[in-house]
Image (cartoon, rainbow, N blue to C red):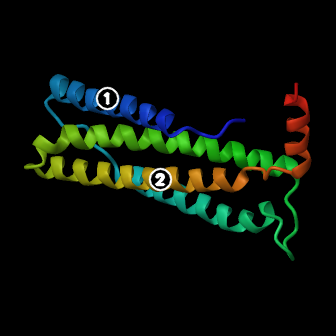
């Protein structure tokens, strides 16, 4: 697996922001009401970010093979890396979508429903951004160190 590229995450966030903006615009155009955003969405993203943060803190010494820490089995390490990649993309998409919703809800913030939507969307986007950052940290921890044998083998193979 290749490391996650920031430009891919930015592209996903921009596309999701456009979808969020379009969802609010369609809802307002069809029904004249603002798209409701439940606070449960924000709390879910914050809980996911917290859970991934706890997993990262617990897995870090095992992945780095620190003295006294039991090494992590390779299959669990691979699944942890896959989890980190999935969480970074999820965080990017959800944050982008709710930033789009918040931007579209800015003109409607004069009403109580508009304010609720705006704050819930911003809370969800903040939790999603935290999930994204924790996922990138976990992915960074999951990277394998380069062994001296690998470097020597690469030099021998590239020699003419």
Residue 60 x/y as whole percent: 72, 64
- Position of residue 1 relative to residue 84, above or below, is above
* Residue lying at the far left of the rendered structure: 110
Pointer 1 with pointer 2, Cβ within 8 A: no
Image position, residue 9 (x, y; %) = 48, 37
Quarter of the view holding residue 68: bottom right
Q: Position of residue 129 (x, y in %)?
A: 43, 51
Residue position for label 2: 45
Front residue (pair 4, 151): 151
Specify the farthest residue to the bottom. 68
Looking at the rendered image, the disc whose residue lies closer to the viewer, 1 or 2, is 1
State how far apart marks 1 and 2 are (Cα). Answer: 20 Å
The number of callouts visible is 2
Q: Characterize the local packing of mark 2: few (<14), some (14-19) or many (20 or more) Cα atoms within 10 angstroms.
A: many
Apparent side of residue 102 relative to residue 44 in the rendered image (left or right): left
**Relative to 65, 18 lies left or right:** left
Task: Name the residue located 22 percent from the left edge and 52 percent from the top edge.
Answer: 116
Front-lying residue, 111 or 62: 62
Residue that appears at 86% across and 36% down? 154
Q: Secondary structure at mark 2?
A: helix
Drawn side of residue 109 relative to residue 87, left or right: left
Looking at the figure, which quarter contains the C terminus? top right
> Left of 138 or right of it: where is 158?
right
Disc ID at residue 97: none
Identify the image quadrant of the N terminus. Answer: top right
Q: Is residue 3 above or below residue 135?
A: above
Q: Which mark is residue 18?
A: 1
Question: Percent x, y for residue 97?
Answer: 36, 37
């Amino acid at each position: 697996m290749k490391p996650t590229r920031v430009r891919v995450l930015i592209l996903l966030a921009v596309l999701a922001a456009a979808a969020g903006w379009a969802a609010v615009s369609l809802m307002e155009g069809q029904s004249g009401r603002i798209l409701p955003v439940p606070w449960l969405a924000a709390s879910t993203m914050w809980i996911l970010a917290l859970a991934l943060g706890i997993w990262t803190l617990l897995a870090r010494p095992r992945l780095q093979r620190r003295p006294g820490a039991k090494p992590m089995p390779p299959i669990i390490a691979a699944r942890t890396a896959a989890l980190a990649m999935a969480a970074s993309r999820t965080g990017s998409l959800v944050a982008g979508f709710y930033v789009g919703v918040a931007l579209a809800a800015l003109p409607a913030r004069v009403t109580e429903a508009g304010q609720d939507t705006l704050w819930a969307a911003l809370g969800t986007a903040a939790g999603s951004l935290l999930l994204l950052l924790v996922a990138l940290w976990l992915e960074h921890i999951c990277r394998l160190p380069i062994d001296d044998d690998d470097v020597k083998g690469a030099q021998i193979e590239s020699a003419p």
